[in-house]
Amino acid sequence: MIDCLTPQRIVQHGEARSASTFQWYLLCSILRVCRARQRRDVPPPKVICSSRRAETHVQGHERFALQFSPRPPKGVKVKPITLVQKTHSRPSYPARRTVYFTSSHLPQKLLPYSVVHQHYAELVRSPLAAVEAYAPVFNLTREMVREVQMHLRWWMIIRQCCGYQSSQDHRNQLHGFAGRRHAEFDYDYVNCDVYQLPVVERAFLSTRLARQYIPWIQFVREDVSLLRDTSVSPGFCNRTNADIRRGMDFNRRWLNAPPPPSPLISIL
């Protein structure tokens, strides 16, 4: 059992397109919910969800590595921090005091020491029910599980139907392509046209987790300038889908050369 009220280093390692971002965001959400279960004597650790290395993400007296140093420097104040990292690179060996979670298209664990392995084919059948598998790992109450499930219910729709990592079928439709990756009977097929995305946005942003923390919708990379493209705010779906219709695709790559700016119209 993982004590979510003590500093942890958690690594999500998964294959590409195996819903690895779902598992990463699920772990972030669980640990954030756990912070509400405060102890009076010990402050709960701050939860950082990122790709950055622990040694470089947190600076100065908050350096994450110092929490696990066998001989921390004297006189250095260390704030409690939990780090949730996501990587597609397979670790060569398990790091000290690190907990691993994995995802892939195979039922076998990617890492033998993985605590929970997410099998894609099983996940897509009932993604919200998959949250229950983490309850005994983090000693979650039923109320905590439900709070995470309510948050993820809307997150999944926005993740598939909005942003620059949305479903390939959705992006193809916005581009006007006839090809489709999934059939309508597939578990992971999504028809974004049936949703009123601004309404889904409001429902997502009204959850407690979205109100208290930055509601990421895709993996946050090193470039801080991408913050606006990775977090949800009112109008996010309309703005990003309009960009995709103009020819922008996965991770803001253009299918062709970007369209020229609109010409200025003289009023003279």
Image: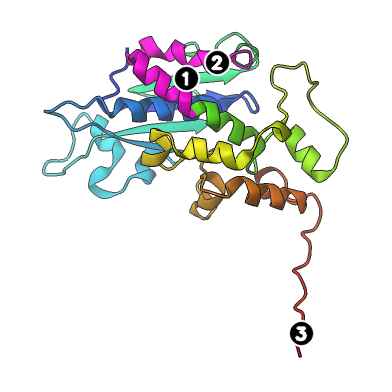
Q: Position of residue 112 (x, y in %)?
A: 49, 11
Q: Viewer-nearest of labels 3 and 2?
A: 3
**Of the numbered discs in the image, which one, if any, rests on residue 101?**
1
Residue name at image x 66 percent, y 36 percent: 161
Label 3: how many residues lie within 10 Å, few (<14), some (14-19) or many (20+)? few
Q: Which quadrant of the rendered structure holds the N terminus?
A: top left
Q: Is 43 on the left or on the right of 248, as rendered? A: left
Element marked by disc 3: loop
Would you say residue 184 is visible in this rendering? yes
**Segment colored magenta:** 123-151
For marks 1 and 3 on the same chain, the one whose residue lies earlier in the sequence: 1
In this view, 115 is above or below 75: above
**Of the numbered discs in the image, which one, if any, rests on residue 143?**
none
The CA distance from mark 3 to mark 2 is 58 Å
The CA distance from mark 1 to mark 3 is 59 Å
Residue name at image x 45 percent, y 32 percent: 85
Q: Mark 3 is on which residue type?
A: Ser
**Of the numbered discs in the image, which one, if any, rests on residue 266?**
3
- The answer to which of 73 and 28 lies nearer the viewer is 28
Q: Main secondary structure of the magenta part?
A: helix
Q: Position of residue 250 (x, y in %)?
A: 69, 43
Q: Which residue is mark 2?
A: 118
Element marked by disc 1: strand
Element marked by disc 2: strand
The CA distance from mark 1 to mark 2 is 8 Å
Q: Residue furthest right?
A: 178
- The answer to which of 138 and 141 lies nearer the viewer is 141
Label 2: how many residues lie within 10 Å, few (<14), some (14-19) or many (20+)? many
Q: Is 213 on the left or on the right of 177, as rendered? A: left
